[in-house]
Amino acid sequence: MPNFTRNAIKDSFLKLLSQRPLDKITVKDIVEDCGVNRNSFYYHFEDLPALLEEIVAELVSSMIERHPTIDSVEEGCGAIVEFVTQNRRAIYHIYNSLSRDVFERHLMKLCQYVVSAYAETVPAGLLSDEVDKAVVVRFHRCALFGTVIDWLNEGMHYDIAAYFHRISRLRLGWPENSDAGASCV
């Protein structure tokens, strides 16, 4: 039964977060929405930031589990798009709160995974050594992260999926588009 209560609290929080900003949600709102008492909330979570941290971490872990390998730039970008659009309003509310760092930390983790997983598929010889690979991974991790942050700063008004689709078609900066053995950065 504890998992049921814990999940009900998380579901209510996500539901409320998709309706209103984070600073407008209280423990009282959550327990009223899911029908548990306040003590049950505090039995499962220390406070709202702990609940938020767990939910965002689970969303990222779930994304990584759904994409055990990344075989193309487009697939990697698609994983990022899936993450940010699944709970679009909730993520927007988290991003525009004092808890933005929670979202950013986990988004960076997801970007790191996506780029690292894709880098593993780059043909041998295109990245001459581990130092080059680390440079390429860092550059593209930051590019993905920055694109999502820019999209959020712009109010999520443009089609980020179409943007990433275009980027994957251009395949800017990936080693397979450069001269064999040359660094792409």
Image (spheres, grey):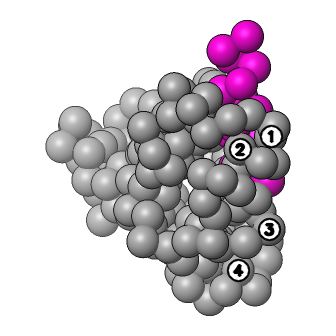
Residue 33 as seen in the image, left or right of residue 37: right
Q: CA distance from mark 1 to mark 2?
A: 5 Å
Q: Amino acid at mark 2?
A: Val
**Sooner in the amino-acid sequence: mark 2 or mark 3:** 3
Q: Residue 179's x, y, as percent?
A: 40, 57
**Sooner in the amino-acid sequence: mark 2 or mark 4:** 2
Residue 77 visible: no
Can you identify the residue that label 1 sits on?
34
Query: Judging from the image, what secondary structure is the residue with disc 4 in?
Result: loop
Query: Judging from the image, what secondary structure is the residue with disc 2 in?
Result: helix
Residue 94 as seen in the image, left or right of residue 155: left
Residue 51 visible: yes
Q: Magenta stretch: give its range.
A: 1-15
Q: CA distance from mark 3 to mark 4?
A: 16 Å
**Sooner in the amino-acid sequence: mark 1 or mark 3:** 3
**Sooner in the amino-acid sequence: mark 4 or mark 1:** 1
Q: Amino acid at mark 4?
A: Met
Query: Judging from the image, what secondary structure is the residue with disc 1 in?
Result: helix
Name which quarter of the figure residue 100 lies in.
bottom left
Can you identify the residue that label 2 sits on?
31
Q: CA distance from mark 2 to mark 4?
A: 30 Å
Tag shown at residue 19: 3
**Sooner in the amino-acid sequence: mark 3 or mark 4:** 3
Q: CA distance from mark 4 to mark 1?
A: 29 Å
Residue nearer the viewer, 111 or 41:
41
Name which quarter of the figure residue 26 lies in.
bottom right
Magenta stretch contains residue 14 = yes
